Image (tube, rainbow, N blue to C red):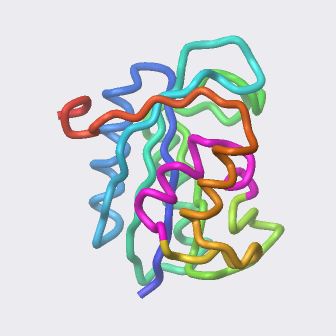
């Protein structure tokens, strides 16, 4: 089985779209574990706050099949790929980790792990002792280092209370 970590983000009808994305992930992957829900301001543009969650899952599918599934889910929920990179999102599904694969062309592990609290925080919550395949440091220690060195705004919520 292949282990993956995904990040789901939305700043439009956030609760509904994240719930719909989770439902679709559950029909495509197994052993799903979901992090707390994290709220953060839009990055790189003026817009509504985002909700983000991290998701651990297992699959027998290869990395390209996983990426195709994520794109299909995004499309089914109304994501428009023609929009600028930094813009409001109905839904955004990112493959953050696929086993310990390092592939710069596929952006795995996702560079956003080291850039954004809304990617690293849920990853550290679900996989605190796992080691970043390039940094050689646990996600918990990366998160502690991030918190002491970066200025960011991030709120954490119980996902079950918020999404029900």
Residue lying at the far bottom in this picture: please name it: 1
Question: Residue 127 in magenta?
Answer: yes
In the figure, 47 relative to 88: above or below? above
* Residue 47 position (above or below residue 34): above
Q: Which region is colored magenta?
A: 111-128
Q: Is residue 67 left or right of residue 103?
A: left
Q: Nearer the viewer, residue 43 or 67?
A: 43
Residue 80 rendering spot, x and y as whole percentages? 62, 31
Q: Which residue is rendered at x = 74% and y = 18% of the image?
A: 45
- In the image, residue 29 lies in the stretch drawn in magenta: no
Q: Quarter-wise, where is residue 138 in the image? A: bottom right
Indicate the quadrant containing the N terminus: top left, top right, bottom left or bottom right: bottom left
Give 127 or 65, whichever is nearer the viewer.
127
Placement of 110 over or under 44, stated as above or below: below
By secondary structure, the bulk of the magenta-drawn segment is best described as helix
Residue at horizontal 68%, vertical 45%?
A: 148
How many discs appear?
0
Q: Position of residue 145 (x, y in %)?
A: 68, 54
- Which residue is at 70% across, 68% downward? 108
Q: Is residue 81 left or right of residue 134?
A: left
Where, by quadrant of the figure, is residue 156 drawn? top left
| Residue 90 shows up from this direction | no
Q: Looking at the rendering, which quadrant does residue 33 occupy?
A: bottom left
Q: Residue furthest front?
A: 148
Q: Is residue 70 left or right of residue 105?
A: left
Q: Position of residue 147 (x, y in %)?
A: 64, 44
* Residue 101 at least partly seen: yes
Residue in the picture at 48% in, 44% down: 8
Q: Residue furthest right?
A: 104
Check the picture and name the quadrant holding the C terminus. top left
């Amino acid at each position: 089985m292949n282990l993956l970590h995904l990040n789901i983000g939305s700043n439009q009808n956030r609760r509904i779209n994240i719930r719909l994305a989770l439902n679709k992930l559950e029909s495509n992957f197994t052993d799903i574990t979901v992090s707390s829900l994290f709220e953060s301001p839009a990055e790189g543009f003026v817009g509504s706050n985002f909700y983000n969650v991290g998701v651990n899952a297992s699959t027998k599918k290869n990395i390209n099949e996983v990426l195709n599934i994520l794109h299909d889910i995004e499309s089914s929920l109304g994501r428009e790929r023609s929009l600028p990179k930094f813009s409001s999102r109905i839904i955004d599904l990112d493959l953050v980790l696929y086993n310990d694969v390092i592939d710069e062309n596929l952006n795995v592990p996702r560079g956003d792990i080291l850039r954004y609290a809304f990617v690293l925080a849920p990853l550290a919550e679900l996989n605190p002792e796992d080691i970043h395949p390039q940094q050689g440091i646990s996600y918990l220690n990366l998160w502690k280092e991030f918190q002491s060195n970066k200025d960011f705004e991030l709120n954490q919520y119980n996902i079950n209370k918020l999404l029900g």
